[in-house]
């Protein structure tokens, strides 16, 4: 059984169909990149997986013993108000909340977990500082640390590198790749950075209000959808070897 | 100084301060979450509904607080639904409900007793006229509000900071929003007895706004608001005793003074 399986999924906002005919599955250990133009329904699909919106048709099944409270999520834009008083530590700790159940306070194990993730993302020195005072890239790391606290199984990342400089972007990608390879965390990531998707992902889902492509990365770069998106000539039938060099 | 010593020798003063301390703590704690979730309007709307309910209760000869608390809780439920549902314009809907409740209250008052001291007290507060049973009810309910707030503190932080993340990771944000609304409803009705329907939202909003000027962490903001709120209560009650000013209004002025002081302090530290 796969970790997540979507069958003939249809999603809409107040009767406006955003996505239909979505069929794909994600197995444990996969690194799925969701690509597509602006407004193609990527974030909407992610919200449906998270249960924030209900499918208008079709099903989303969780397998491999995955529970709703074992998912880590990095939203596309966190609408946190500019002057929200919270320290980095408070924000990261809040990721531990989903496994507390009704128990009121964080345990020392939660605190260690939060500290470990802050260290991993190199923000442990900022733990006591206020979140609103950090740079965009640092805030993004804080939110990734929070997402990591929430899961050891599945991370859903909605454009995690928007607004980051090229160096930090590289670092962010390698952190995510490490989490996937070394810690065995399944990753579903929305990205406009198709080159990075082709470099790190194991699978690609290409959306255009319907499913343009789903399959392994290797198949994607050979497919028409993929080659068009990668800016290659579709009439060129022979796969261009230089992409993977 | 002697005036203040003398003040504490009156049992009704001591009762007022005990009940007031508890209510101030509740409103300060909840205020942080309400302000940050941009629910301040709900607090204001509920105070009008509360006044309407109290007026109807007096007209019917029912016990005012015991009648008003459930009515305001139900109103809180509706207001929350309205503000969550983005298709209706939230703030105009709140205005409709609160002004209608006020109108119903005014009509019940004029049809029954007329504008007597009781009505006046619910509009402008009457901390010194609180009866023993009012004080006991206030202390018990406030204690419950405070205990629930502390128990659910981590959840309240998380849904206040980022409700979508909370929902996405399996936290039932709707239930906790409801909890905040119910606790707010209880606090507002109790606060109305003390500070008055027209002024109670000040008690909810001011302490958290003041502490947000200087504190960096959520926890510090919560603790600081609680302290500010209680200190302003004592300052306001003492001032009203010394200068024979209305108590509710004096407490609000004390909060305004604190707000200005914290704003200046925040500016200087920046
Ligand atoms: N809350 C909403 N209510 C109504 N329509 C919405 C809502 N959110 C998104 N939409 C619509 O759904 C469509 C898909 O939006 P979605 O956010 O999923 O796109 P996306 O692929 O994530 O785009 P981007 O790359 O810009 O993030 C858009 O046409 C958008 O207008
Ligand atoms: Mg998006």
Image (cartoon, coloured by chain):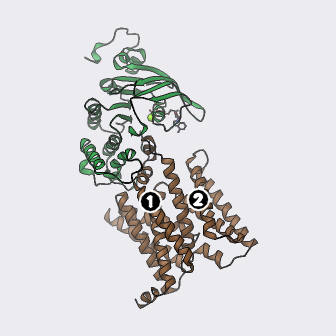
In this view, the residue farthest toward the top is A237
- Percent across and percent down for residue B35 are 47, 58
Q: In what element is the residue under mark 2?
A: helix
Where, by quadrant of the figure, is residue A129 drawn? Answer: bottom left
Q: Is residue A58 above or below residue B225?
A: above
Q: Relative to residue B67, is residue B34 drawn left or right?
A: left
- Judging from the image, what is the letter of the chain drawn in green? A
Q: Residue at x 41, y 53 (%)?
A: B157
Task: Give the letter of the chain under mark 1.
Answer: B
Residue at image x 26%, y 51%?
A: A126
Mark 2 lies on residue: B73
Q: Is residue A74 visible?
A: no
Q: Specify which label sits upstream in the sequence, 2 or 1.
A: 2
Residue placed most toward the observer, A12 or B187: B187
Q: Which chain is brown?
A: B
- Residues packed near mark 2 inside 10 Å, few (<14), some (14 to 19) or many (20 plus): many
Q: Quadrant of the N terminus of chain B?
A: bottom left
Is residue B26 depicted above or below B129 in this figure? above
Q: Quadrant of ligand 2?
A: top left
């Amino acid at each position: 059984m796969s970790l997540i399986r979507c069958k003939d999924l249809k999603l809409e906002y107040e009767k406006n169909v955003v996505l239909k005919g979505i069929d794909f599955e994600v197995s444990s250990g996969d690194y799925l990149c969701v690509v597509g133009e602006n407004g193609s329904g990527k974030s909407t699909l992610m919200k449906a997986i998270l249960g924030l919106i209900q499918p208008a048709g079709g099903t989303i099944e969780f397998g491999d013993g995955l529970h709703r409270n074992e998912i880590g999520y990095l939203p596309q834009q966190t609408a946190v108000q500019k002057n929200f008083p919270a320290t980095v530590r408070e924000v990261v700790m809040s990721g531990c909340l989903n496994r507390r159940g009704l128990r009121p306070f964080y345990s020392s194990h939660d605190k260690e977990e939060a500290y470990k993730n802050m260290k991993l993302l190199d923000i442990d020195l900022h733990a006591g500082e206020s979140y609103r005072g950090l740079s965009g890239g640092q805030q993004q790391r804080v939110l990734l640390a929070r997402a990591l606290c929430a899961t050891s199984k599945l991370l859903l990342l909605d454009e995690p590198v928007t607004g980051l400089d090229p160096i930090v972007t590289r670092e962010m990608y390698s952190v995510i790749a490490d989490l996937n390879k070394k810690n065995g965390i399944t990753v579903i990531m929305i990205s406009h950075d198709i080159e990075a998707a082709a470099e790190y992902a194991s699978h690609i889902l290409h959306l255009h209000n319907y499913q343009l492509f789903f399959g392994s990365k290797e198949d994607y770069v050979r497919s028409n959808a993929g080659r068009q998106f990668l800016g290659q000539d579709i009439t060129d039938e022979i796969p261009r070897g230089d992409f993977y060099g | 100084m002697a005036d203040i010593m003398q003040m504490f020798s009156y049992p009704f003063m001591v009762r007022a301060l005990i009940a007031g301390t508890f209510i101030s703590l509740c409103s300060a704690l909840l205020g942080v979450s309400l302000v940050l979730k941009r629910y301040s309007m709900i607090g204001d709307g509920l105070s009008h509904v509360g006044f309407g309910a109290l007026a109807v209760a007096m007209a019917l000869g029912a016990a005012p607080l015991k009648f008003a608390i459930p009515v305001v809780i139900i109103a809180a439920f509706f207001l929350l639904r309205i503000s969550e549902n983005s298709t209706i314009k939230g703030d105009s809907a709140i205005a409709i409900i609160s002004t209608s409740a006020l109108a119903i209250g005014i009509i019940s008052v004029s049809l029954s007793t007329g504008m007597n001291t009781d009505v006046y007290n619910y509009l402008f507060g009457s901390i010194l006229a609180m009866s023993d049973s009012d004080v006991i009810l206030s202390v018990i309910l406030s204690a419950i509000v405070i205990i629930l707030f502390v128990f659910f503190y981590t959840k309240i932080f998380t849904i206040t900071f980022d409700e979508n993340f909370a929902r996405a990771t399996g936290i039932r944000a709707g239930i906790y929003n409801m909890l905040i609304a119910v606790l707010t409803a209880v606090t507002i009705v109790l606060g109305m007895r003390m500070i008055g329907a027209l002024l109670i939202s000040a008690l909810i909003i001011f302490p958290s706004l003041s502490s947000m000027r200087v504190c960096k962490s959520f926890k510090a903001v919560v603790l600081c608001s609680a302290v500010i709120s209680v200190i302003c209560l004592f300052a306001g009650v003492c001032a009203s005793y010394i200068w024979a000013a209305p108590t509710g209004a004096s407490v609000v002025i004390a909060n305004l003074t604190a707000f200005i002081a914290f704003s200046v302090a925040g500016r200087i530290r920046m």
